[in-house]
Amino acid sequence: LPLAKVVTDWELSAQQPVIERKLSQLQLLLMRTPKEPESLRPLVTDCFRTLDRYLAERTGGNSGAAGRGEVTDRTKVVARTTAHRLETIGRQLAALR
């Protein structure tokens, strides 16, 4: 199941453990990935940052919103933007294979 689908289709309570597990896996991968620019490291870093930023926005930033509709709209925008970025990273990874 692509992470982009998890981000757009699942409830946050179901997403969070999956994304946290993926972040841990990406951290381990970063420790083992060569630092050369032509390696996978930039894509792994980008994926980590994308997921970390998404989770931070979803779990911490909505308390000051003016209304329920705005929170829902903002959540949808964040999810779509994150899903698009993850799909782009996936295409870049596929091109390296």
Image: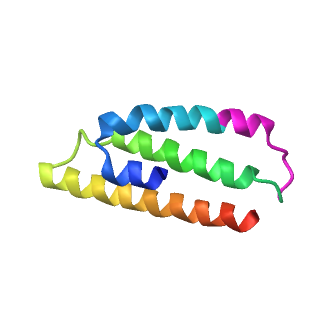
Position in image of residue 55 (x %, y %): 43, 41
Above-or-below relation of 53 to 84: above
Left-right relation of 7 to 50: left
Q: Is residue 17 visible?
A: yes
- Nearer-the-camera pick, 88 or 42: 88
Left-right relation of 66 to 51: left
Number of on-image labels: 0
Position in image of residue 96 (x %, y %): 75, 64
What residue sits 56% from the left and 37% below the top?
Answer: 23
- Nearer-the-camera pick, 62 or 20: 20
User: In the rendered structure, does residue 33 fall within the stretch colored magenta?
Assistant: yes
User: In the rendered structure, does residue 75 fall within the stretch colored magenta?
Assistant: no
Q: Is residue 60 visible?
A: no
What residue sits 21% from the left and 47% below the top?
Answer: 65
What residue sits 68% from the left and 55% below the top?
Answer: 43
Position in image of residue 39 (x %, y %): 81, 54
Magenta range is: 27-37
